[in-house]
Amino acid sequence: MRLFSKRLAKSVTPDMTVEVTESRGIRQLHLGTGAIQSAMRISRPWDLELAYTRAMMGFLLFTRAPQDVLMIGLGGGSLAKFIRKHRPDTRITAVEISPQVVAAARSHFELPGDDDRLQVRIADGAAYVPAHPESADVILLDGFDAGNQVESLATIEFYSACMRALKPGGVLVVNLWGRDSSFATYFSRLVAAFEGKLAWLPVMNKTNVIAFGMREETQSWKWRDEELAQLGKRWGLDFAAFARGMHWAHDIVPLLDERA
């Protein structure tokens, strides 16, 4: 637990420890370590508090009006709540393996109950994705356990299954830990699974790296200032900064060199 944080809840099972803390008006979710898995500003529960979650919304640079969003890993439900607020017609399915995490999201992070636009399923994402081909316009993959990438959600077979689970024009969005010793391995698997159709966005000096895998062949995108301004006004995010920071798969060598 962080110093000066107040513990609100703690649930311990043989498989996982889920803890909710609060400090200075921000509620935080931890999974077995002091690392922050999800955060919510109590005065603005529907906003995205963490920089990496805002960066994951960069998928809107590639697909503007997703009808079906699949989340693998729920956390506190920040992305589900944000998309629901700004685009209520989008159908969101969140797959989370831990009932404890779902309970924490509902009881402490204001995640609403299931309805025709939001469904939370307690299941293993590694099994769910291959069983649902061409079902999602966007897949948001944020699979961590006690601070580590979940290996079953980071294999080339799973990334390939994600590509098959995308509808035409779909995008896979992956939150990677930029300082993970296996980062280069995970990224190379993504490049292979998506045959090089990949963009990446560094966050907070590459603490997180958000990867965007495209189902269809595409050239490096160029966005007009007016487009970025309209997106920013619509969603309340800095899409101009996302566009400036976006790199493409062939630019991965400098990133790996800096980590060496």
Image (tube, rainbow, N blue to C red):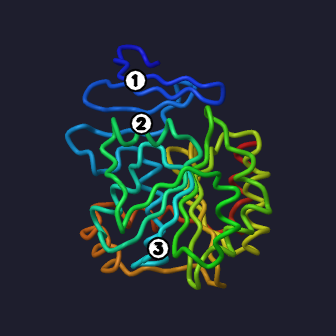
- Tell me the SS state at disc 2: helix
Which residue is drawn at the image coordinates 35% and 14% (left, top)? Answer: 4
Total marks placed: 3
The residue at which mark 1 appears reads as: 9
**What whole-number distance in Å separates the C-alpha atoms at marks 2 and 1?**
8 Å
Q: Point out residue 60 in the picture as x, y percentages from the top left corner.
A: 43, 71
The residue located at (53%, 30%) in the rendering is: 35
Amino acid carrying label 3: it is: Asp
- Residue under pointer 3: 68
Q: Are marks 2 and 1 in contact (CB under 8 Å)?
A: yes
Q: Front-most of 111 and 226?
A: 111
Q: Residue at x 31, y 51 (%)?
A: 112
User: Whole-percent x and y of residue 232?
Assistant: 30, 67
Between 133 and 256, which is closer to the camera in this rendering?
Answer: 133
Mark 2 Cα shell of 10 Å, populated few (<14), some (14-19), many (≥20) = many
- Mark 2 highlights which residue? 104
Q: Compared with residue 64, is residue 96 higher up or lower down, i.e. above or below?
A: above
